[in-house]
Amino acid sequence: MPREKSSPAPVTAPAGIGFEPLMHADLGEQTYAAIRMRILRRELETGQQIPIDLVAAELGVSRTPVLDAMKRLAAEGLVEIRARRGCYVRALTTDDVREIFEVREAIELHGIRMAIREGRNVALAKSLEEACEAMEAATAGDVYVDYDRFTEWDRAFHGAIVTSGGNHRLQELYGNLHVHLHIMRVHYFRELEAAIRIKADHRAILDAIRHGDLAAAEAAMSAHIFITRDRITANLAGDGGRM
């Protein structure tokens, strides 16, 4: 009797990682935004490989927009492209955190100096006052009543200071830093940010800027930035030095 041919083993599709197909015309921008959002939400974990073909299949695009997105994300410091090995979600080390906060300090101090030296500090103080009031309304004592609203106005507070420097390149650099600051906030925010301290810090910065006291404004800003930096680096040390 002729031997029966064995049926080929069924092919098992690789497990998905949760991307939804894209439906609109600007696929390159949407691909970038979709991957970036997953990283910022920590839905793609530090050190995790991002499989190009699988992401392309789930988004319903070719490999090209995914590869282009990887290059943009690598330039932002969110992705590490390893030759012949693939693309990975980049980890933040203790040294990364220190450097990020040092650059942040330099940019924000520049904004304060320019505003005070050029006589724009009173106008800046009005914007900062609005942000402070909104942040205070989003808290009750040391409790965050609306944490998303608080962080939105916290970004507005610091963004106004950066913008007051009048340097577009520094503003762009600060925008890239804010991606990493967001990741740190997602990772550690409940442990790091005592609402009463943050509000007091902001008020000290605001008052010094309003009165044109450059030395006091610089000191208040540096203290505000580096308290958070030191807490993050301490937590990172306890977690093996990587986020």
Image: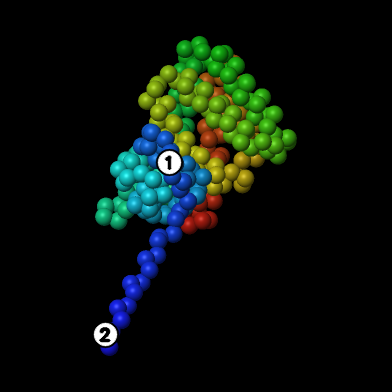
- Residue at 45% in and 20% down: 165
- Residue at 48% in and 27% down: 108
Q: Which mark is residue 2?
A: 2
In front here: 182 or 214? 182
**Rendered view: 201 above or below 17:** above
Please identify the quarter of the rendering in which residue 145 is found: top right
- Cα separation, mark 2 vs mark 1, equals 50 Å
User: Which residue, as the protein is rendered here, is positioned at the far front?
Assistant: 1
Nearer to us of marks 2 and 1 is 2
Instruction: Give coordinates of residue 228: x percent, y percent.
Output: 55, 40
Identify the mark nearer the N-term, 2 or 1. 2
Amino acid type, label 2: Pro
Residue 74 visible in the picture: no
Q: Which mark is residue 22?
A: 1
Query: In screen coordinates, is 154 left or right of 60?
Result: right
**Rendered view: 142 above or below 54:** above
